Amino acid sequence: MLALHLKANRKEQVVGWYASAALGEQGEDGPDLIADTSSLIHEFYAGESDEGDPIHLVVDTRLNEDAVSARAYRSMPVMVQGEPLANLFHELRLTMETTEPEAICLDKMASGGKMGTIPPSDSSEEPLLASMEKLYTFLETATNYVDSVVDGTITPDAELGRQVANALATVPRIRPEVFDKLFNDSLQDLLMVTYLSNITRTQLTVAEKLNASLGV
């Protein structure tokens, strides 16, 4: 899997490993997040990572309060008379950063990803609509700024001008009819994937209820 991943992402490297745990089920700080096998797995990734000092990430998969919780750890050897006896995991400061598409996907997964709940058929359009409204607001703000500079209403800012120019330079120049076709094709693909996902979720829910009723 790593070899296949590096074919498309040659600059990436192994920095550690992750595991899932239900945080907060026992006590205020939750259960033991470091399992008995964590040290053995950590030693394996110490040999796989380029730095030899991997990061252990523990992810809460329950999605409580519509949020994804995670904690990061680094291992330090416990030395007894000069010999390593065990590993002691120290928690690290962790900051989660996401791009806008990732944030939309995570929000959708957290709000509607629970088994047994079937979202309405038009729910897939909500993140797309919010994203398009946000894009429209940005375009309107940039347009108003440029018009104000041209009219002499406000003093031009060279740095803002460069940012607007850089943003426009990233947009490929294609004919309107070609853009409409590409957009509609992509939208159809998105709707098809959403439709298939909803069907799969419905089938899983039905199968789960049948298994529960039959005692399987």
Image (spheres, rainbow, N blue to C red):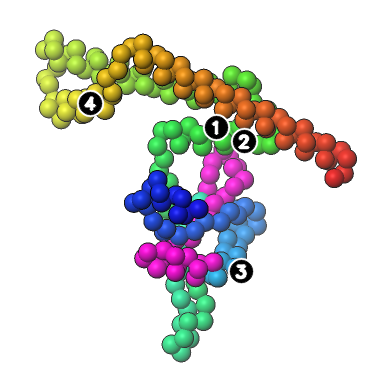
Q: Badges 2 and 1: C-beta atoms under 8 Å apart?
A: yes
Vertical position of residue 83 compared to residue 163: above or below: below
- In space, the residues marked 2 and 1 are separated at their CA atoms by 7 Å
Where is residue 63 shown, x and y percent of the image?
A: 59, 42
Q: Which residue bears the numbered disc 2?
A: 113
Residues in magenta?
41-69
What amino acid is labelled 4 in the image?
Answer: Ala
- Tell me which numbered mark, 2 or 3, is placed earlier along the sequence: 3
Q: Badges 2 and 3: C-beta atoms under 8 Å apart?
A: no
- Tell me which numbered mark, 3 or 4, is placed earlier along the sequence: 3
Residue reaching furthest bottom? 81
Residue 93, located in which quarter of the rendered image? bottom left
Quarter of the image with the C terminus is top right
What amino acid is labelled 3 in the image?
Answer: Asp
- In space, the residues marked 4 and 2 are separated at their CA atoms by 38 Å
Q: Is residue 185 magenta?
A: no
Q: Which residue bears the numbered disc 4?
A: 169
Q: Residue at x 39, y 22 (%)?
A: 134
- In space, the residues marked 1 and 3 are separated at their CA atoms by 34 Å
Q: Which residue bears the numbered disc 1?
A: 108
